[in-house]
């Protein structure tokens, strides 16, 4: 995984299963059946969740074969560029569509497939709702403490979703305490996490809430999403797919009408806190013991030792060695699976990264460093670069008119800049 026209990052959804639909190309009859499933669900919602219909044009495409199917007749005129291996909105024939690659839609799991399509339909109307935020750049979620405290938050949220009464109240107080502790340890984390929960967490919640036949169905699906969050190899760019449904279904129970109060600057944890009469748990160590915190920390410490070796190797490649650096602004897609944060430097994304920017286009499949402040991207170089078509190990870039590549201050490094 992981929304707007101009993304900093669009992650592939972490919950996507391995079973894809038709292997090799889009099958029109099968796609039509899936479109009908999504249409029935969004028609049933009838604007209940967000005050506007979720229904809108969808396209399923396969980037390998170039095949596609649309939920309504294709408009006249040129076909837009679809977002590669990721999903995303596209403008086509004067309308905003949502495009989904075939491999993201599991043929043998109708529930998940329908949730994913409704997730995408929410993204289609997201600008209309005003819930557009920048990428949170949550590199702290790849650190030992960041991972421990967010998993404790998820475990408490899951307990809250699956219980009621006094147990639910205690679990919510624990979850909010773990959330507060993580944000105390990482200044700036509160705003960064909040942005991703609004940008992507609301879409994941909507996929579940519009799909569910009952509140019990929604709670079961949210609990599954929370449990699935821990199974992901990296939480940066993925955590909101677990957190969003958890907070959303609890708010549905405890703060009816919360969606009408929601703004792009809202914090889902603050909303949930306002709906409860119990403050966050004071003693987080005692609370952590309720969720097998000691075993979790032991496992994460072992993971962190291995991660430090990996970070050292990446630092030599992306920080100490020669690189090509370019502006990060534009429309990009990436698969955050296996991404690794380099403290103080940024996050390395390894799979299916694309960027269309004012300066040109980048494709990278063997590592691209997104700076911690989100302003630049860097890829390793192993020799001189010149001209408008640039290549390196696992990446290629094409420059638009008015932009050039020039030597940078670091020996052997280059940068893409405007031509004087």
Image (cartoon, rainbow, N blue to C red):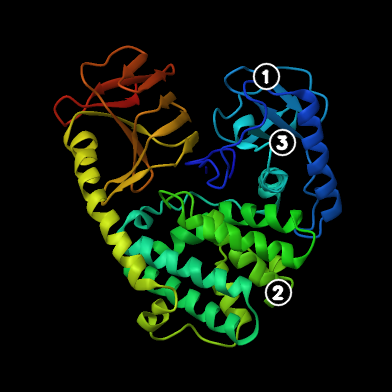
Whether residue 306 sits left or right of residue 158 in the image: it is left
- Is the C-beta separation of discs 1 and 3 under 8 Å? no
Mark carried by residue 96: 3
| Mark 2 → mark 1, Cα distance in angstroms | 43 Å
Q: Residues within 10 Å of mark 2 (few under 14, many from 20)?
A: some
In the rendered image, residue 234, in percent from the top left (x then y), is placed at 41, 49
User: What residue is drawn where x is 69% and y is 30%?
Assistant: 60
Pointer 2 or 3: first along the chain: 3
Pointer 1 or 3: first along the chain: 1
User: What residue is drawn where x is 43% and y is 64%?
Assistant: 150
Which residue corresponds to mark 1? 67
> Disc 2 vs disc 3: which is toward the camera?
2
Residue 307 versus residue 183 in the image, above or below? above
Please identify the quadrant where the C terminus is shown: top left
| Mark 2 → mark 3, Cα distance in angstroms | 32 Å
Which residue corresponds to mark 2? 253
In the rendered image, residue 276, in percent from the top left (x then y), is placed at 60, 83
Residue 102 versus residue 231 in the image, above or below? above
User: What residue is drawn where x is 74% and y is 71%?
Assistant: 257
């Amino acid at each position: 995984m992981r929304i707007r026209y101009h993304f900093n990052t669009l992650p592939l959804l972490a919950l996507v299963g391995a079973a894809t639909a038709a292997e090799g190309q889009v099958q029109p009859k099968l796609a039509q059946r899936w479109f009908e499933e999504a249409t029935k669900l969004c028609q049933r919602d009838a604007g209940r969740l967000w005050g506007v219909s979720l229904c809108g044009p969808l396209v399923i495409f396969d980037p390998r074969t170039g095949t596609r199917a649309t939920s309504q007749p294709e408009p006249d005129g040129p076909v837009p560029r679809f977002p590669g291996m990721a999903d995303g909105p596209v403008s086509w024939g004067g309308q905003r569509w949502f495009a989904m690659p075939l491999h993201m839609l599991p043929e043998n799991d109708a529930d998940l497939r329908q949730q994913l399509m409704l997730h995408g339909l929410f993204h289609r109307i997201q600008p209309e709702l005003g819930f557009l935020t920048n990428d949170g750049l949550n590199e702290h979620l790849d650190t030992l403490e960041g991972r421990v405290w967010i998993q404790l938050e998820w475990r408490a949220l899951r307990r809250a979703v699956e219980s009621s009464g006094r147990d639910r109240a205690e679990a919510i107080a624990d979850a909010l305490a773990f959330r507060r502790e993580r944000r105390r340890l990482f200044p700036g984390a509160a705003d960064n996490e909040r942005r991703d929960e609004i940008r992507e967490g609301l879409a994941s919640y909507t996929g579940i809430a519009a799909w569910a036949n009952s509140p019990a169905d929604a709670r079961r699906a949210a609990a599954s999403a929370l449990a699935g969050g821990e199974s992901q190899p990296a939480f940066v760019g993925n955590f909101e797919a677990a957190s969003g449904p958890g907070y959303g279904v609890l708010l549905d129970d405890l703060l009816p009408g919360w969606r009408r109060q929601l703004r792009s600057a809202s914090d889902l944890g603050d909303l949930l806190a306002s709906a409860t009469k119990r403050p966050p748990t004071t003693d987080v160590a005692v609370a952590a013991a309720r969720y097998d915190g000691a075993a979790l920390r032991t496992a994460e410490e072992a993971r962190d030792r291995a991660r430090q070796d990996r970070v050292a190797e990446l630092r030599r490649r992306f920080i100490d060695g020669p690189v090509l650096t370019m502006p990060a602004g534009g429309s990009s897609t990436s698969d955050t699976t296996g991404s690794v944060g380099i403290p103080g430097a940024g996050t390395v994304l390894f799979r299916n990264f694309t960027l269309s920017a004012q300066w040109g286009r980048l494709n990278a499949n063997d590592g691209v460093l997104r700076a911690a402040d989100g302003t630049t991207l860097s890829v390793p170089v192993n020799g001189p670069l010149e001209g408008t078509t640039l290549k390196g190990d696992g990446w290629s870039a094409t420059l638009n008119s008015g932009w050039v590549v020039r030597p940078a201050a670091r020996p052997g490094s280059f940068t893409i800049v405007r031509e004087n």
